[in-house]
Image (tube, helix red, strand yellow):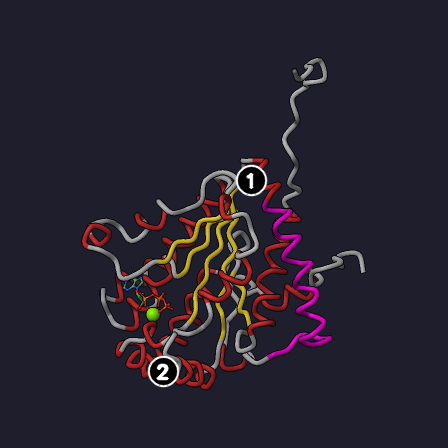
Amino acid sequence: MKDEKADGVAKSDIDQYRVKPGQKVALAGIDSRQKIPPGKKAIKERQQGLLQRLSDLQYLLFAEHRRRLLVVLQAMDTGGKDSTIRRVFGPINPQGVNVTGFKVPTADELAHDFLWRIHRRVPGAGDIGVFNRSHYEDVLVVRVHQIVPENVWRKRYRQIVDFERYLVQTGTVIRKFYLHISRDEQRKRLEARLQNPRKRWKMSRADLAERQYWDHYIAAYEEALVRTSTRWAPWYVVPADRKWVRDYIVASVLVSTLEDLDLQLPLAPKLDDITLN
Ligand code: ATP
Ligand code: MG
């Protein structure tokens, strides 16, 4: 097959996870426990090569110093944002990557428009920026908990689409991932955290309480996905109950995206006439 890449999944395979513009998404109908053929062992081996390829492409992105890559990660609590960042971006030269976690906005952030704190963290030329949560919180948690009235958050879909179009037109490449876990998987992960003294600190009463809003969050995600997955800034719904599947899809999309940029090393200066002493 022409678009088959040695280490990644074929482009046609990745495309099944992409939310097509305007396409309705029913998350309940997407199996979060999906596997990828030929299976865990082979995929984990391929993943090694894929991550090496990602590192090589990042080197070119950095050297070219022109375009930027913005990766948005969203998920329910325990969805695996942190571990995806560790496992997919861990092998990359840290000089070229910056990760931003977006927490409850500070007073200063709240005094500005909701995209203000986001725009400041968009990567610079040659860099990869990873958002652990993002401007999408402003149509997710904010909607679920009615932090602002509906006529305010509803306008944000359009504002986000416009903002992302602007970023793309000015040299930023955007890929967005929703790590899709089941409610059952979340329970297992929360229980594991409760039992593991090394992970207990991550938990709060609020995390457990948030679980009761599961259906509200699903509805908010579904609307965000359909309204903001565009040709220029697509969403991918990544089956994420299995970590090896999740990591492989995220890495495959990023490798394929960077390959499409046709990154080139800058022209080297002519230095043949210099003799080193
Ligand atoms: P971990 O998964 O390790 O717990 P986290 O991303 O959940 O990391 P926390 O500090 O636990 O980090 O949570 C951040 C909280 O900030 C989340 O509950 C999130 O919904 C909330 N948050 C982020 N952006 C906004 C926003 N714009 N308005 C309100 N709350 C927000
Ligand atoms: Mg948390």
Identity, as a three-letter code, of the amino acid under mark 1: Phe
> Quick check: is 79 in the magenta stretch?
no
* Quarter of the image where one finds residue 78: bottom left
Q: Nearer the viewer, residue 242 or 5?
A: 242
Which residues are the magenta region? 34-58
Residue assigned mark 2: 194
Q: Secondary structure at mark 1?
A: helix
Residue assigned mark 1: 62
Q: Nearer the viewer, residue 19 or 247?
A: 247
Question: In the image, ligand 1 is in what quadrant?
Answer: bottom left
In percent of width and height, residue 221 lies at 42, 70
At 32% from the left edge and 80% from the top edge, which residue is drawn? 213
In percent of width and height, residue 168 lies at 49, 45
* Quarter of the image where one finds residue 228: bottom left
Distance in Å between CA atoms under marks 1 and 2: 41 Å
Dot 1 or dot 2: first in sequence order is: 1
